[in-house]
Amino acid sequence: MDGAVNGFNRLYGNFLHFVRRLDWLGPLALRLFLAPIFILAGLNKVANIDDVAAWFGNPDWGLGLPAPMLMAWLAALTELLGGVALLVGLAVRLVAVPLLVVMAVAAVTAHWQYGWHALPETTLTMPWEWRKDLIEEAVVRKAKAVELLQEYGNYDWLTQAGNFTILKNGIEFAATYFIMLLALLGSGGGRFVSLDYWLCRRMSNGGSAAT
């Protein structure tokens, strides 16, 4: 029995030793996933900054935020420059902080009132959905829209690129990106494929040479 336990411990130890060599893959995957999302979001805001500011500031059909033009530029540049920094792995822990703030603000101001799910999932993927009423209403409206399209439109052609759905617009995506950024805040950009790693290594080698 002791021999089997010791053998398992050795195998598990070897497995952990091997996995530690791959610890750079997780941060790299997170960075490559998030970077294009933030870069494109930032570019879109910059290209339509007046419309973004109007949406940020309008209390009736927008978010009703103060200083909307300033807020629009802050959000746009944070996403754009933060996305570029994530892509190359530069100051990852630092840029994660303002991106976390942007995601938190987006979740609270633009999505919270719609609950968790981005789409009206009839089978909940998360048990803490607090706007199930919107899911039920979306299902009714989707059924009516499909009925109208089947009666008056070429439904087969309309659905060739995918089925119709209704956007519920909950915090799901913003919360997911927030969690991913939180992981990067803790891990940094990772080894080998981030500028942070090579800059820190260069500084460490320079410091050692100086001493």
Image (tube, rainbow, N blue to C red):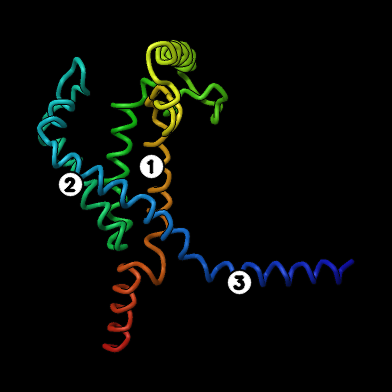
Seen as rendered, the residue at the extreme right is 1
Q: Secondary structure at mark 3?
A: helix
Q: As drawn, is 48 to the left or to the right of 210?
A: left
Q: Are marks 1 and 2 in contact (CB under 8 Å)?
A: no
Q: Which mark is residue 178?
A: 1
Q: Earlier in the sequence, mark 1 or mark 2?
A: 2
Q: Which mark is residue 17?
A: 3
Q: Relative to 170, is 80 above or below?
A: below
Q: Quadrant of the N terminus?
A: bottom right
Q: As drawn, is 96 to the left or to the right of 67?
A: right
Residue 63's image quarter? Answer: top left
Crowdedness of circle 3 by 10 Å Cα count: few (<14), some, many (20+)? few
Locate residue 87, reporting x and y percent: 31, 59
Mark 2 residue type: Leu
Mark 1 residue type: Phe
Q: Secondary structure at mark 2?
A: helix
Please identify, in this view, whether the residue under mark 1 or under mark 2 is nearer the observer. 2
The residues tagged by marks 1 and 3 sit, at their Cα atoms, a distance apart of 30 Å
Q: Relative to 102, is 19 above or below?
A: below
Mark 3 residue type: His
The residues tagged by marks 1 and 2 sit, at their Cα atoms, a distance apart of 18 Å
Q: Are marks 3 and 2 in contact (CB under 8 Å)?
A: no
Q: Earlier in the sequence, mark 1 or mark 3?
A: 3
Residue named by callout 2 = 77
The residues tagged by marks 3 and 2 sit, at their Cα atoms, a distance apart of 40 Å
